Image (cartoon, grey):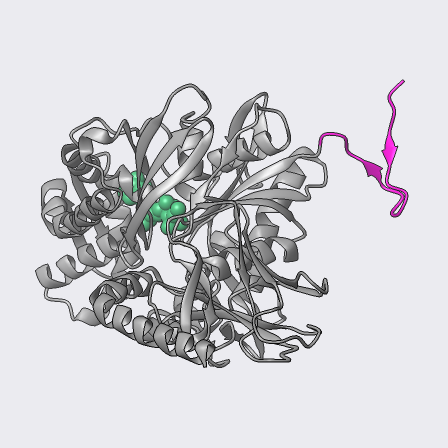
Amino acid sequence: MPKYAIDLKSGAIKNEHPIIIGIDLGTTHSLVAIMENGKAQVVKDEFGENALLASLLHLSEDNVFSVGEKARAYIEVDPQNTIYSVKRLMGKSYDDLLSYKDFYGYELLDTGPENLVKIKLRDKSFTPIELSAEILKSLKLRVEKLLDNIVSKAVITVPAYFNDAQRQATRDAGKLAGLEVLRIINEPTAASLAYGIGLDKSVVQTVAVYDLGGGTFDISVLQIQDGVFEVLSTHGDTFLGGDDMDKLIARHWCDQKVFPATFIPSLRKLAEKAKKHLSEHDLFQETDSRFGELSLTRSAFEVIIKPLIDRTLLACEKVLSDANLTINDLDQVIMVGGSTRVPLVKKEVSAFFQKAVFDQMNPDEVVALGAAIQADILAGNQEDLLLLDITPLSLGIETVGGLMDTIIPRNSKVPTKVGRSYTTSVDGQTKLMVSVFQGERDLVNYNRKLGEFVLSGIPPMPAGIPKIDIQFLLDADGILKVKASELRSGVETSVVIQAQYGISEEEMALLLIDSIKNASSDLAARALQESKNEAANVL
Ligand code: ADP
Ligand code: MG
């Protein structure tokens, strides 16, 4: 007779083997995958047709969201209430998005530099977290209908460069959709898992993951060893992808047929159709009621998009030099993202890395499939594998005179835990402000403040006597917990650092460049401040 475990609080029957779903929450498409008979499978829509769910949302007059392809028609007729690319807004403030405000057809609300941006839809405002949750709900429902069972746990993927705030936002979106997010994993890690790389613990492998999607390009180099996936470096362009190819085709037709440039937006859908057709054929030809005969050959298309591909290859060069590797060090190159279906992309990337690329699986499905495999590992169905990432910027605290004291250096592997001892600088001091910063500069003023808290209740003692221990704990999702305790009295305070807003990859690069440019002046400033501190101590 079967035995059932009952949750005494809710009275619900506990499922002994809960299903964990894998979700690729993408900028242009999102999808969900599950394990079926030991194999990862994507889950198709209710008609059993499409696994890709367009990451589009529309809010109707009676406040109902439609998600996916159903929302597409509204981009043109009701742009203010139609959301695309919500992933770009995750973990960002209004100020973060100012430079590409024109990109959006909907209204972003200025909620101040310290807060996450909101989006105005009809007479309401929504956070990107709430909007992403609608996409996640739709995917969750898909699986529940298919399995006729409740789904409550998920693994969700994010780009390797996503920072704390963006990861936390993704996690929160999951929670809002009724999903316990067991793990946030990097998209390139998921893609490698989908190809079975890393499942054999005995081999060490170095792989490059080239991901060209609808609106973004990412290249990451991973080292996989003993079941540990380590991101050695990552680069990319947050405004480069298949959408740009569509725009270039539309522009080409406008030039050719002497249409005004205002036709470009309406031509884009046909342009995308032409592009996809040319991945399989040498010629696209169609007579359109509005635009007349439109045609494009594959070779003309290739000439048009070559500069875009060249830009991705520049990033590939950078990612290798950042990781201190040459192409000979790479064992595999994995192609991810719908735009890698373009034959010229495969050809150029393969030529650049001087090896055949992995493209046997559907490039727009691999990330979701890998997430499902990770879910299966977490469910305990596969041998224990660990995922390891690196932190892209140093984390530390402010010490006397505004100096940055780095506690977890950039490029450290996570999860990690580092502790350091401090003391007070003033007699009878009962409080200590702990300000946490991210960045590479010696002076905290130039770095990014992640948060601060006060350790209070320190018994009054002469300066230098209290023993204050500060622990930084960075978990596998890249979320930081900071704990401060005074060891003599036992008082302690801890906080989870959730950065108020995120920074872009470009800004991150700028911060790094800045720290190199200012290295000598920073060093001098630090030396001066340190001697001042020392002099004060002596006095
Ligand atoms: P994202 O990860 O950004 O959500 P995807 O990986 O789903 O994006 O890629 C979407 C892009 O792939 C779109 O620009 C789409 O036009 C392009 N794409 C899809 N199929 C093909 C194809 N057969 N040939 C060329 N491009 C394609
Ligand atoms: Mg993607």
Determine the image quadrant of residue 437.
bottom left
- Pinpoint residue 147: horizontal percent, then vertical percent: 67, 34
> Is 6 on the left or on the right of 252, as rendered?
right
Quadrant into which the N terminus falls: top right
Q: Is residue 107 above or below residue 479?
A: below
Q: Is residue 220 above or below residue 311?
A: above
Residue 218 visible somewhere in the drawing: no
- Pinpoint residue 323: horizontal percent, then vertical percent: 27, 42
Residue 6: within the magenta? yes
Residue 480: within the magenta? no
- Pinpoint residue 444: horizontal percent, then vertical percent: 40, 72
Q: Is residue 204 above or below residue 346?
A: above
Where ligand 1 lies, by image quadrant?
Answer: top left
Residue at 37% in and 29% down:
361
Determine the image quadrant of residue 255.
bottom left
Residue at 38% in and 76% down:
445
Using the image as rendered, state which of residue 317 and residue 40 is in the foreground. Answer: 317
Q: Which residues are the magenta region?
A: 1-17
> Is 406 on the left or on the right of 282, as rendered?
right
> Is 225 on the left or on the right of 507, as rendered?
right
- Pinpoint residue 531: horizontal percent, then vertical percent: 35, 75
